[in-house]
Image (cartoon, helix red, strand yellow):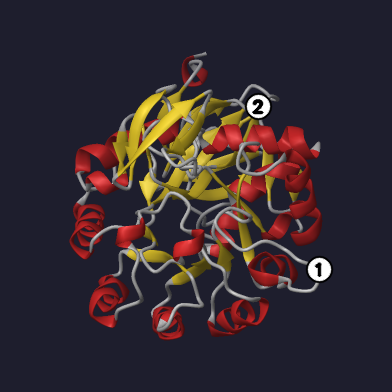
Amino acid sequence: MRIRNGRILTPGGVLEGHDLVVAGGRIQALQVPGGEDGDILDAQGLWVAPGLIDIHIHGALGCDVMDATAAALGRVARYLAQHGVTSWLPTTMSASREEIDAVIASVASCPQPLDGAQHLGVHVEGPYLCRKHRGAQAAEALRLPDPEEYDAWLQGGIVRLITVAPELAGADRLIAAGRRVGIEFAIGHSGADYETVLKAADRGLRQATHTFNGMAGLHHRQPGTLGAVLDDDRVFAQLIGDGLHVHPAVVRLLLRAKGRDRVILISDAMRAAGLGDGDFELGGQAVTVRGGEARTLDGALAGSTVTLDEVLRRVMRYADLTLPQALPMASTVPAAAMSLTGRKGSLQAGADADIILLDDDAQVQLTLVGGRVVHDRSGVINS
C-alpha cells in the first residue's frame, strides 16, 4: 500500500509530496512518488499520523478490563480503533490477588484483534497504593507490596507498567526487581515526599500516573510528590486532559514545566465511555456519571468518559497547540516512556504500520493497525 497526497507527521516534521509505503505490516519507506506498485490510498490532504497509544485506560462501552474476558477486551479494542488508538495498555484497579491475576491471564490468552487496537500488555494500577490518596481505588483492596504476589507479574511477560506508591514498605524492592526485567513504573496514588520520589527515580521509576490527581500537592517549602514529578526530568507525566481532572490553566502550566516531550496524554477512561450519563461500576465501587463526569458515591473522580482523541483535541484547545505540536504527546511520547521508540509512535521506516488519518479538526477518518484498515469513518478508501 502507498498512502499518497497526505501531510505526513514524521519525527523530523511535516512531510508533503511523499508516499508512505507499507508492506508486511511495517512502514517500508517515505519516498517521492514514482512507483505505482501496490494499492494507492489517497489521503486527500488529510494529516497522516502515527496511531495513538493509550497507556492508561480501564474500559469503555460498558466493558471493563477487570471483567477479565476476551469479549470485553475485544469490544474495547474495536471502540478504541474508531478513535485512532492503535495500541493500549489494559489497566487494572486495586483488587484481590485472584482478580488481578485473572486480568493478566485474560490479556495473555486473548488473541490480538484483527479489527481493533492491539494491547501492549497490562498496566497494573494498584493495589500497592497510599490509602490517603486512593481516589476511586477501593480501600479494602490496598496492601503493601508482596513478592509472593508480584513475582509472578514480573516473570510472566505480560505486565508492562505498574503504578505504585514508592513510600510503601517494600516498594523499593518491587521497583528494582521489575526494572531488571524491563517493566516500567509510575508513581501514583501517593503521598511520597520529594526525596522519596527522587530515590524511586534513581531505581528506575520513570512515570507519574495521572499527574495532579491522586497525589500530594505542591508546597513552596515542601515540594512533595507533585514537586518531584515536575522537577525531575527523568519522569514522564501522564495527564488526563479532559478539562475535568485538571483545569486548563494547569494543563498549560504542566506543559511549561515538563515540556511536551515529557507529557503523556491518557484517557483513564472507564466503562461509561461511549455510553453517556448513568450509573456504573469501577473497581467494585458504584460510580455515577453526570454531564460526562464520573464520581464515586463519596465524590471522588472515577476515571474519565472520553477517548484519547478527544483528550488530544481538548489539550490542543487549552494550550493553543497545533496538531503537529500536540499529537506526539499521545503517540511518540508514550512510546518513548514504554521503551517502544522506533517500533511504535512514529512514522519512519521499520516502524509498525499503525497509522491514522485526521482532518484539520483532529477528527479520525481512518485507522490502520499493522497496515490493515480497521476503521474508515468517511469512506476514504472508496472515495
Viewer-side residue, 19 vs 354: 354
Residue 197, numbered circle: none
Going by the image, does 231 lie left or right of 170?
A: right
- At 39% from the left and 31% from the top, the residue drawn is 272
| Residue furthest front as drawn | 298
- At 40% from the left and 80% from the top, the residue drawn is 174
Disc 1 target residue: 220
186 shown above or below 321: below
Residue 115 in view in this figure: no
Viewer-side residue, 220 vs 320: 220
Q: Position of residue 148 (x, y in %)?
A: 23, 80
Q: Position of residue 160 (x, y in %)?
A: 40, 65
Disc 2 target residue: 46
Going by the image, does 112 lie left or right of 187?
A: left
- At 52% from the left and 49% from the top, the residue drawn is 27
The numbered mark, 2 or 1, whose residue comes first in the sequence reads: 2
186 shown above or below 51: below
Residue 141 in view in this figure: yes
